[in-house]
């Protein structure tokens, strides 16, 4: 596989991940953070960093819109639920585990 083919495969995988997240809006960011230690907002930051590495400009709101498929405020109003006490406890435990090695 040459470099261009590798980049195209990586881009396809990224698009598939974004579509998968879009198709599963019921999965809350906190749940992803608990399980995988990243969320849609992390993806937006990584995407924005990739854009900036190319010498282009993109702000965080634009990056989140690219990941969420709509302005973040709109997505949050439509799909984000308040974190439950159980989710918050699991998130806190995940964060505490990071300090252990």
Image: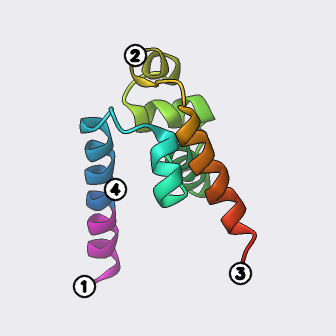
Question: Residue shown at 46%/30% (left/top)?
Answer: 65
Question: Residue shown at 53%/41% (left/top)?
Answer: 87
Q: Earlier in the sequence, mark 3 or mark 2?
A: 2
| Residue 40 visible (yes or no) | no
Residue 89: give x, y in percent of width and height. Answer: 62, 45
- The quarter holding residue 101 reads bottom right
**Would you say 4 lies left or right of 95 here?**
left
Q: Confirm or deny contact between disc 4 and disc 1 (CB under 8 A).
A: no
**Would you say 97 lies left or right of 45 here?**
right
Q: Earlier in the sequence, mark 1 or mark 2?
A: 1
User: Residue 1 shows which numbered tag?
Assistant: 1
Residue 56: give x, y in percent of width and height. Answer: 58, 46
Question: Residue shown at 67%/50% (left/top)?
Answer: 92
Number of residues whose C-alpha sits closer than 10 Å to that of mark 2, classed few (under 14), some (14–19) or many (20 or more): few
Closer mark to the observer between disc 1 and disc 3: 3
Residue 96: give x, y in percent of width and height. Answer: 71, 61
Instruction: Give the magenta part as a residue range.
Output: 1-10
Q: Which residue is mark 3?
A: 101
Magenta region includes residue 6: yes
User: Residue 14 shows which numbered tag?
Assistant: 4
SS class of the residue under badge 1?
A: loop
Q: Earlier in the sequence, mark 1 or mark 3?
A: 1
Nearest to the observer: residue 11 or residue 85 = 85
Q: Which residue is mark 2?
A: 78
């Amino acid at each position: 596989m040459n470099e261009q083919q590798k980049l195209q495969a990586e881009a396809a995988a990224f698009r598939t991940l974004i579509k998968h997240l879009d198709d599963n809006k019921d999965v809350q960011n906190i749940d992803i953070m608990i399980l995988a230690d990243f969320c849609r907002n992390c993806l937006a930051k990584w995407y924005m960093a990739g854009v900036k590495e190319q010498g282009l400009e993109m702000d965080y709101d634009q990056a989140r819109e690219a990941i969420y498929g709509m302005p973040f405020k709109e997505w949050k109003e439509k799909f984000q639920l308040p974190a439950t006490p159980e989710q918050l406890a699991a998130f806190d435990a995940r964060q505490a585990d990071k300090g252990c090695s």
